[in-house]
Image (cartoon, grey):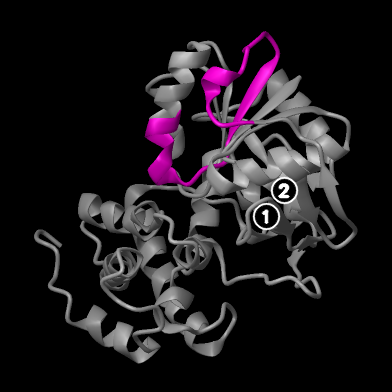
Amino acid sequence: MRYIIYGAGGVGGVLGGRLHQAGRDVVLIARGAHLDAIRRDGLRLVTTDCDVRLPVPAVSHPREIDFRSGDAVILTMKTQDTEAALLELENAGGLDLPVVCCQNGVENERIAARRFARVYGMVVYLWATFLDAGTVIGNTEPYSGVLHLGCYPSGVDGFCDEIAADLNASHFLSRPRPAIMGYKYSKLLGNIGTAIPALTGDSIGSAPQRRLNAILRDEALACYRAAGISLPDEAELKEVNGNYRRVAIEGHPSGEGSTWQSVARGRTIETDYLNGEVVLLGHLHGVQTPLNAVIRRLTNQVALGREQTGRWTADDLEAMAGAVPAQPGS
């Protein structure tokens, strides 16, 4: 199998680099200075057990790839870039490509299923830092990430088994899971707090961040209950995810989560598909989601350069959430 990693930033770079190290056939799709650096010097992969430059083939667009039977496309871009990327992929590779959504949020699979018959969901428990062109840092141990997958909307097949086997041989932990979207909704509960450092300057794990994150989770869980969304229980998550954890690597910045990194690099953000997903569920099912609404709105203001990072305190955000008008019909 050849792995085409579409979006070779932090997650995609670590994924592609580890697969390449394990002898798998990999092509990265990257852009700009990052692509130039990979082509010139190789992909620099920094983890707890290596600091290497890897000669991974890289292209700027799907049309530069001669697609063939046995290719697997793994999407690793942010959700706001998925629609345009899939249009490019369809035009270059046709409709029969298997597409794996190795992305946060729960919208990517729905976008992909409009164009492709074979769509797979992949939950992403992988801390990665991407701040400098050509370099990706994997901040997870004892694996480089936990990447369970399944058919969308449900089920497993031989393709899932094959990918999981390759990932398990490449410093990852991966298991086919028939109810993969439940895992992705569970992961979303953690992602909705990633914007907080960009707004308040509070580090992930700090007391103010934990307090806000608890409120965000409560709003999301109320939406899940109203929508009838089932999650794996804590015992199951612990059993299938092992003891992975985030670690800092001496001499290398670890950032404050993917949203903070996007803001720091001047990129667009995916908050509309994280906190915004909770807000959407609230509208659909009559549940109040004021803090998620505030986080979504303000993070977009920061990303657009209309507000500064660290502009608010946790108390400010709670106060603004308290002033959000109730949704009609709630």
Q: Residue lying at the far left in this picture: please name it.
A: 328
Q: Which residue is drawn at 61% across and 47% down?
A: 34
Tell me: residue 258, above or below residue 4: below
Tag 1: residue type? Leu
For label 1, count other residues whose C-alpha is less than 10 Å away and answer few (under 14), some (14-19) or many (20+).
many
Task: Give whichever of discs 1 and 2 has the lower sequence position.
Answer: 2
Name the residue that disc number 1 marks: 126
Q: What stretch is highlighted in magenta?
A: 59-85
Kindly check if marks 1 and 2 are in contact, taking CB atoms under 8 A apart as contact: yes
| Residue 313 x %, y % | 37, 89
Comparing 61 with 309, the one in front is: 61
Q: Residue at x 41, y 54 (%)?
A: 270
| Residue 91 x %, y % | 43, 15
Lateral position of residue 27 relative to residue 31, left or right: right
Lateral position of residue 72 relative to residue 17, left or right: left
Comparing 310 with 226, the one in front is: 310
Q: Find residue 79 and name its label.
A: none
- Tell me the mark number nearer the camera, choosing from 1 and 2: 2
Give the structural element (helix, strand or loop) at label 1: loop
Give the structural element (helix, strand or loop) at label 2: helix
Marks 1 and 2 sit apart, C-alpha to C-alpha, by 9 Å
Name the residue that disc number 2 marks: 14
Lateral position of residue 162 relative to residue 63, left or right: right
| Residue 258 x %, y % | 54, 61
Tag 2: residue type? Val
Q: Residue at x 43, y 80 (%)?
A: 212
